[in-house]
Amino acid sequence: MNTIILLLILMISALLIVAPPVGVWRSLSRQTSGRAAWLYPALALIGPFIAAFVFVVLMWLPAYSGQCGGWLGETSPCSGFGQYASETMFWAAMSMAMPGLLGMLLGVAVLIFGLIRRQKHARRQ
């Protein structure tokens, strides 16, 4: 079971690092115009983080056992499901913060590179 959890965490981390730059590149390669043209790169940057966050929270919520904590080995009785849910969301966000931020940073770099390339291409024509 621990191996499955480790592989799942590695897969989610890889998704958070790779998906934003690929999504931004694909959104820049499409010829979109209008008021919503900025929406596609923004969704490509933040979308994988939101999707992974929801997936991780939904994965851990059914494991409610009445005990809170446990991330660092200390467990205590929960005051209810609300406390367990809030701790689960907090630790899900914390566990994905570094790979998510790295993916967003790479996505912003691809966005800047793509916009510079698009502007140079527009000047030539």
Image: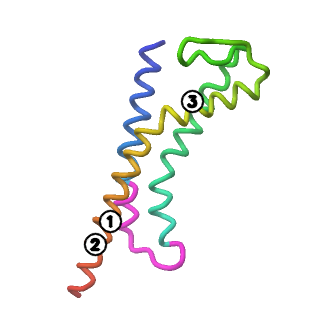
Alpha carbon distance from label 2 to label 3:
38 Å
Q: Secondary structure at mark 1?
A: helix
Q: Quadrant of the C terminus?
A: bottom left
Name the residue carrying label 2. 116
| Kind of residue at disc 3 | Trp
Say which residue label 1 marks: 112
Expressed as whole percent of the image width and height from the top left, the position of residue 42 reads 48, 61
User: Closer to the observer: label 2 or label 3?
Assistant: 3
Which residue sits at x=74%, y=18%? 78
For label 3, the residue is 91
| Secondary structure of the residue carrying numbered label 2 | helix
Seen from the viewer's position, the closer of residues 90 and 121 is 90
Residue 33 covered by magenta stretch: yes
The reply to whether discs 2 and 3 touch (Cβ–Cβ < 8 Å) is no
Q: Position of residue 21 (x, y in %)?
A: 35, 53
Residue range corresponding to the magenta coloring: 23-36
In the rendered image, the residue lying farthest to the bottom is 125
Please give the name of the residue rendered at 20% of the width and 85% of the height, measured from the top-left corner: 124
The structure residue drawn at horizontal position 50% and vertical position 44%, both measured from the top left corner, is 49
Image spot of residue 40 (x, y percent): 48, 64
Examine the structure image and report whether residue 102 is included in the region drawn in magenta: no
Depicted 74 relative to depicted 121: above or below: above
Give the alpha-carbon distance from disc 3 to disc 1, as whole Å.
32 Å
Question: Within 10 angstroms of label 2, few (less than 14), some, or many (20 or more) residues?
Answer: few
Q: Secondary structure at mark 3?
A: helix
